[in-house]
Image (cartoon, rainbow, N blue to C red):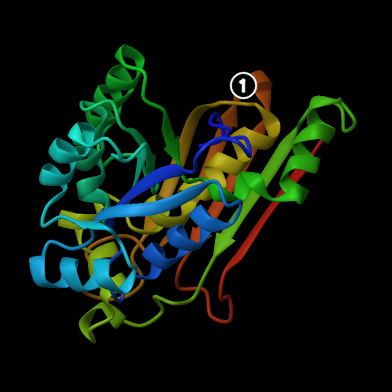
Amino acid sequence: MSQVRVSETQRKLRAGIVGGGVGSFIGTVHRIAAQLDNQAEVVAGAMSADPKKAEESAKAWFLPRSYSSFQEMARVEPTLPDGIDFVMITVPNHLHFPVAKAFLEQGISVVCDKPLTSTLEEAKELVALVERGNAIFALTHNYTGYPAVRQARYMVQQGLIGDIRKILVEYIQDWLMEPVETTGNKQAVWRTNPAQAGISSCVGDIGTHGENLLEFITGLKIKSLCADLTTFVPGRALEDDANILLRLEGGSKGILTCSQVAAGEENALSIRIYG
């Protein structure tokens, strides 16, 4: 929500959350992030599709209001004198579009986890909703906030490395080396399931961060690409490794590598830019 500023004399922004219930990884991350600058407080949530778990999660977070569905929350909150200013969407990929649409149609700003949607058509529909209304839409490409990333962007913008010739982006992990989706790992279950993750697992999960960093730092857009997607773990429905050749604006070339089956790499993200 970088476009919103609250002075010391103004009230805190009121936030809602969809998903992120007890046992969720990313829900806690969002709650902590919302509190870091003391400008927002989470006051409402539809934290699980299971009404009982939703209520238990809201109590654990000390939320004043709990809803059994995101539809109910989107309908009721705008009618309240202390309704939410924005909502944080922390559900699996296939729900990003319907949840975001429900709140945007009510004029409520949205902070949504990446990827934006599962299809280009859905993404375009959300863009049109934002352009027609006054709500703000923010996508959580959080690595753009790192000081080193901002410094790299500044150096490129100032021309300190000259015209860009080549970009190498790498984001590699090892947590999906084994078929952990068959052993009860909740994160692995939905991230490797096409019905929830969409058409991509590894690229949609972490490759999106690499692509975002490339465009954020260099300002260059991808014109065409050639992707080699591989599923190394037998029986897995989606790719767990990707190597992508990129052609960029101005003749620059790039390589984006992402993997979640690279032994010994817990969470390694890097970008190299050559001018």
Image coords of residue 244 (percent x, y): 50, 46
> Of the residues shown, which amino acid type is indicated by label 1?
Glu
Task: Pick whichever, 264 or 42, lies toward us.
Answer: 42
Residue shown at the point (75%, 49%) measured from the top left: 147
Task: Pick whichever, 220 or 84, lies toward us.
Answer: 84
Image coords of residue 199 (percent x, y): 25, 49
- Give the left or right position of residue 251, taking residue 59 as reference: right
Residue shown at the point (65%, 27%) measured from the top left: 219
Residue identified by numbered label 1: 249
Q: Secondary structure at mark 1?
A: helix
Asked which quadrant contains residue 170, the reply is bottom right
Image quarter (top left, top right, bottom left or bottom right) of the C terminus: top right
Residue shown at the point (30%, 40%) measured from the top left: 82
- Give the left or right position of residue 142, taking residue 60 as reference: right
Residue shown at the point (36%, 39%) measured from the top left: 86
- Going by the picture, which residue comes out furthest to the right? 160
